[in-house]
Image: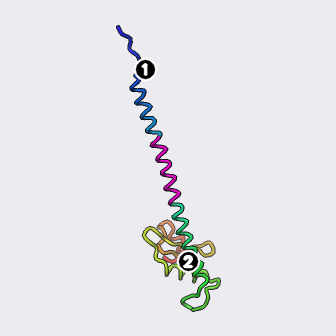
Amino acid sequence: MPRLSRSPSTRVRILGWYVALLAFALVIGLLLQRSILLAQVDDEVDAQLRQEVGEMDRLSGGRNPSTGEPFGSDVRAIFDTFLSRNIPVQGEALFTLVDGRPHASTTPPPSCCRTRISSHGGRR
């Protein structure tokens, strides 16, 4: 009677190593792709924030269209003018804070925050 070997055949071992190598390459590829995409999103967000800050800087150095006078330190008027002139794209929202409290936004706040924001004078 022939003896049955319990160790896998050479073909099975080669197939196992092949599957393991493919799984390893897939995981490495996915991690690399994830890090590249996250870096691209990060760069995009930074560029958009720099653009908004530049617009805010130019506006704050200008004149209040309601009064014709320079804005000076009237942060609320700067924010109101900024928000009235900027139309956010889909999926974008602009929120402003004055003295650490919500002032105004281009979209209604989430339902969990409406009471808190409206009690501080922010517009809906």
Circle 1 residues within 10 Å: few <14, some 14–19, many ≥20: few
Colour mode of the rendering: rainbow
Instruction: Give the residue at the far bottom of this rendering.
Output: 68
Report the span colored magenta.
25-40
Q: Nearer the viewer, residue 6 or 104?
A: 6
Circle 2 residues within 10 Å: few <14, some 14–19, many ≥20: few
Instruction: Give the residue at the far right of this rendering.
Output: 73
* Rendered residue at 61%/88% (across/down): 70
Query: According to the image, label 2 marks what residue?
Result: 55
Q: In this view, does 92 lie above or below 79?
A: above
Q: Where is residue 16 in the image (x, y as percent from the top left)?
A: 42, 30
Query: According to the image, label 1 marks what residue?
Result: 7
Q: Position of residue 45 (x, y in %)?
A: 52, 65
- The reply to whether the magenta stretch includes residue 97 is no
Instruction: Give the residue at the far top of this rendering.
Output: 1
Element marked by disc 1: loop
* Rendered residue at 41%/22% (across/down): 8
Amino acid type, callout 1? Ser
* Rendered residue at 60%/78% (across/down): 57
Q: Which of 86 and 120 is in front in this view?
A: 86
Q: Is residue 124 above or below residue 25?
A: below
Relative placement, left or right, of 3 versus 33 is: left
Q: Report the predominant secondary structure element of the magenta stretch.
A: helix
Residue 75 location, quadrant: bottom right
- The reply to whether the magenta stretch includes residue 35 is yes
